[in-house]
Image (cartoon, grey):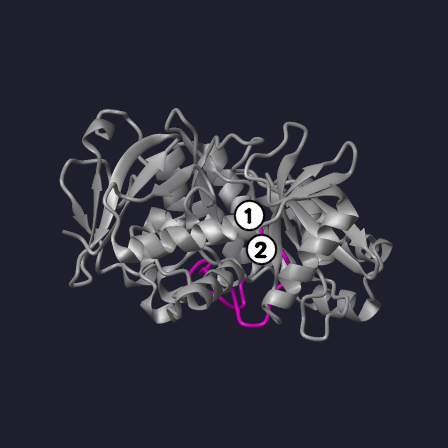
Amino acid sequence: MGQHHCNIHLWGEKIGTVVQMNNRKTFFQYSKNFLSRGLEPSPIHLPVVSEPYETTSLIQFSGLPGFLSDSLPDNYGARIMEKHFIDQFGIPPYEISPIQKLLYIGHRGQGALEFDPPEKLTIETQRSLEIAQLVDQARKVVSGSAIDVLTDVFQYSSDSLNGVKAKATLGWNRKDNKMISGAAVMPQEYEPWIVKFDGTSKDKVHEYHCVNEYLYLKMAKECGINVCEADLITDGDYTHLAVKRFDRNGNDKPFHVSSLAGVAHIDFRDRDTMNYDLFFRITMRLTNDVSQLEEAYSRMVFNVLSGNQDDHAKNHAFIMDKRGEWSLSPAYDLSPTFGNGHQMAINYKTKGVSLDDLIIMSQRYGINKADEIIERQLSVLQKYEMMAKELGVPNTVINSIKKGMK
């Protein structure tokens, strides 16, 4: 009998179970009824078969299958989760099992995957559920004008974990400029957005990370790249970034989402295992669509030309619809981050990538529009200084960012 296990659901249907035994070995098995559905939530490393998979060796995912690990929170969310476990039960982070984390996420994760407890609860499972319920109960519903709601949520988010970049998922009615936070069910006129907060440094001064990420998304869109919808919200001295969730349509969850890291079973922190060649090959294997390969190439070009070096394998993702068809997710987390080289190699380089390297990559994968893509992007990126000045970015910040551009 497993020490910890939970059931995995996709669009309301049980697709499998993940189990961690007393000896810490972890197994995942697809449900019998799911075998004939024709859907592949992890087609490369965990194709749908009746036999169980042992995933213990996937230490980069704490033993979980990659596509399940994608549902676990990032740095900010992980710190919030760990705080709840230690505050409620005195459980330190190193004692929280990965399955307890999945149960904590429950139905609140990215994409369409949901995690439910087994019929018979262990003490550890019960604790995870109690914490998740306490979080839901503590998440008071706040609604009203966008600024009032943001002020309330920002105060909690920035105070709870000082120095960690805070963000929150909110409902936004843009027509009336109203927001709602903490609602289990989104009112019909609201859309789900993620708000990244400005002013979350220790001295809580206005920074320009949010403004620059907005500008990078805007420029990428002008370059013809499919990006997530974004907007800026000014609140006094702060300028927050709002990004519309591409994995939600109101309360519906139309897409299963998996990062490049989760699909490929690679550690996004290990630059030796990540490269754009792998990204391109997986894009073609999942989508079998040359236009999607060109989209992936355009994103690589943009990252090189704009100086976005935070291009690791969790900042690229794929989405699967209810028919089982895969495509690239909209581009996200685009911002000026340079200095230590790219996180994924371009033509076997992470530093000193040239225009010739971009051309070689296009030739390697039969992309005929490389010159057109590069010229268009160079033209768009020349507008950065003008766009940044219009939004009040200081010359010192602008000049620093321009140094990282090609």
CA gap between label 2 and label 1 equals: 6 Å
Horizontal side of 54 relative to 217 (left or right) equals: left
- Identify the residue position indicated by label 1 in the image: 299
Examine the residues drawn in magenta and state their main secondary structure.
loop
Which residue is pictured at 83% across the width and 66% down the height?
Answer: 394
Label drawn at residue 303 = 2
Q: Secondary structure at mark 1?
A: helix
Residue 334 in sight from this viewpoint? no
Which residue is pictured at 47% across the width and 44% down the height?
Answer: 108
For the residue marked with disc 2, what is the amino acid? Asn
Residue 191 sits above or below residue 104 on the image: above
Which residue is pictured at 43% across the width and 49% down the height?
Answer: 105
Which residue is pictured at 53% across the width and 49% down the height?
Answer: 137
* Quarter residue 172 falls in: top right
Q: Position of residue 365 (x, y in %)?
A: 42, 43
Which residues fall within the magenta stretch? Answer: 332-353
Q: Position of residue 169 (x, y in %)?
A: 60, 47
Q: Are marks 2 and 1 in contact (CB under 8 Å)?
A: yes
For the residue marked with disc 1, what is the amino acid? Arg
Q: Is residue 344 within the magenta segment?
A: yes
Q: Is residue 214 within the magenta segment?
A: no
Residue 322 sits above or below residue 100 on the image: above
Observer-nearest residue: 188 or 278? Answer: 188
Q: Position of residue 84 (x, y in %)?
A: 47, 62
